[in-house]
Image (cartoon, grey):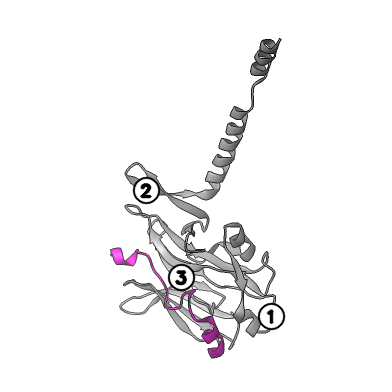
Amino acid sequence: MRSCITASLVLMVAMCDCAAAKSAGSQPYAATFAENSPFYARCIPTKSSGNEGTTQDLRVRPEANEVVATFAWYNRNGLVMGWSPKAGKVAVMRVRQEEGLPPEKQIEFSFYLGELLLRSYTTADLMKLGAHVERDAVAMERGFGASSRRAAYRVEGSNQVPGTNDYYFRVRLSDAQTVCFDIITGRVCRVEKDGTAQRLVPVENDKAANEKTAEAAGAAGRPSAQHKETEREKEQ
């Protein structure tokens, strides 16, 4: 049963040869977990190019496979799948989603839990998280122009926080930097040690705490009114 809830990576991943995918056109494919799992995704395009189509998450049953989620889109650049024991639902990360758009409008990837869209991240969002921007050769081949850009990243699948039922998607922005996204919320998070255990912590909460710490540190570094008065008395 453990293999059913462990980290997963799909048949078509974000590191696929996108140029080859382009020349072949949009093709039906099955996205699967890396390890044995009763779940898989069936991805069917309705046109030879673009992302129009249908994606379904299915559970393998002895009699007939059960559809557990349906999406009114097809993603030619692949999916990453995960399982949340807490929610009891399949999680999907839709990668390399749009192209040829301005950074603030171009969606790089989206997170789903069941059929619910949790959160999407644009090229501009990833740049704020530290991602580099590179020329999008595939977009240029499709006629979007030489100015087409996108964030550089590699999806490293769904990962479990040791000793817990918490999972997160990990995305590598560079050799030295990775970003984690909570599988249940789609929000940026990090793994924190809690004594001998570990847990997921939302990074947004850390930001607020850091701002308070910085403010307190600034106040500590500024002399108080009483201290200033004492210094003036010494000078006199």
Q: Is disc 2 surrounded by few (<14), some (14 to 19) or many (20+) residues within 10 Å? A: some
Prevailing secondary structure class for the magenta stretch in the rendered image: loop
> Is 142 rendered above or below residue 179?
below
Locate the N terminus and report the quarter of the image it occupies: bottom left
Q: Is residue 5 magenta?
A: yes
Residue pointed to by mark 2: 198
Residue pointed to by mark 3: 80
Q: Which residue corresponds to the image point at 50% horizontal and 56% vertical from the top-left?
A: 185
Q: Amino acid at mark 1?
A: Phe
24 or 30, nearer to the observer: 24
Q: Secondary structure at mark 2?
A: strand
The answer to whether residue 212 is visible is: yes
Q: Pick whichever of labels 3 and 1 is earlier in the sequence.
A: 3
Q: Pick whichever of labels 3 and 2 is earlier in the sequence.
A: 3
Locate the C terminus and report the quarter of the image it occupies: top right
Q: Which mark is residue 144?
A: 1
Q: Secondary structure at mark 1?
A: loop
Give the magenta range: 1-25
Horizontal relation, residue 126 to residue 180: left or right:
right
Q: Within the image, what quadrant is residue 230 found in?
A: top right
Q: Amino acid at mark 3?
A: Val
Measure the alpha-carbon separation of dots 3 and 2.
24 Å
Q: Secondary structure at mark 3?
A: strand
**Badges 3 and 1: C-beta atoms under 8 Å apart?**
no
